[in-house]
Amino acid sequence: MRVLTIVVSLLLAVTGLWATPTLNGDTVTVNYFSPDLSSLMATQDVFVGPPLPEVTCSAFGSGVCSVFVEPGTISIHDLSIIVTEDAGNVYATEPFNGFQFTGLDFGDGSTLTGFNLTTDLPGLTASNVSFTANSIAFNASGLSFMDAPYTVELDLVTSSSAPEPGAFLLLGSGLLTIGLMHRRRR
C-alpha cells in the first residue's frame, strides 16, 4: 500500500511539472504609447479569459479603444494576445507607436521568456516586438493597414513551458526508489 501511495504522489508531482501556465483569471494592463514609450496615450485594465475574453472597440471609443481609428478588438486568453483592426489607416511614423501589455502573471510563478508572432500587418516583424519578464509590446510605427484589416497575434512562451532538467532527475530518482523498494520486498 505504501508503494501505491508513493506512486500516486509521484504521478501528481509529475502532472504539476507539465501544468500549463495561463493568463486566464488575471487582469492585464493594455497601454498605447505614441509618439514614444514615455508618452502614454491610453490605458485600460483588461480582465483575461471568460466571461469577457475580448474588448471590442469602435472607432475612437473610450479607454484603450480611444486609439482605434477603425473598429477593432483586443483579445487576451490562455497564452495569446491578439489585436485586430479594420482596414483604413496608417500608424503614424514616430519612434514608438503601438501597444504594450503589462502585468502578465501566468499563475504558476513562471515568467515571459519569448514569443511567437503571427501577423498580416505588412512590415511588422519580430524585431518590432520587445518584452520583459512580465510585459510585451509591439511597435507598428509607420505601418499601413489602409487596404486590408490586420491581425497581430503574440503567442507567449514562458519559463515553465517545458519541465526543467532537474524535474526529470527528480522523477527518475523517485521511480528508481520505488523499484528498489519493490525489489527488497520480494
Image (cartoon, rainbow, N blue to C red):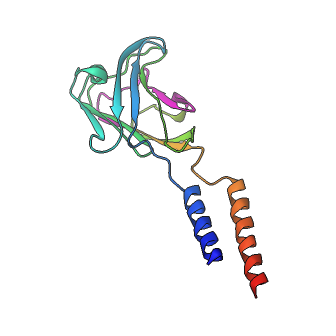
Q: Horizontal placement of 84 versus 78: left or right?
A: left
Left or right relative to 60: residue 22: right
User: Does the magenta-highlighted stretch encompass residue 67?
Assistant: no
Q: Position of residue 71 (x, y in %)?
A: 23, 29
Above or below, comparing residue 129 to residue 41 in the picture: below
Q: Look at 42% across and 23% down and name the residue there.
A: 98
- Which x, y percent locates residue 31? 40, 22
Q: Which residues are magenta?
A: 127-152
Q: Position of residue 60 (x, y in %)?
A: 23, 20
In the displayed image of the protein, which residue is found farthest to the front? 1
Q: Quarter-wise, where is residue 53 in the image?
A: top left
**Quadrant assignment for the N terminus:** bottom right
Which one is nearer the viewer's eye here, 167 or 6? Answer: 6
Query: Can residue 86 be seen in this snapshot?
Result: no
The foreground one among 95 and 12 is: 12
Q: Position of residue 163 (x, y in %)?
A: 63, 54
User: From where the camera sits, is residue 143 visible?
Assistant: yes
Viewer-proximal residue among 123 and 166: 166
Residue at image x 71%, y 60%?
170
Q: Is residue 137 magenta?
A: yes
Q: Is residue 63 above or below residue 109?
A: above
Residue name at image x 77 percent, y 77 percent: 180
Q: Quadrant of the C terminus?
A: bottom right
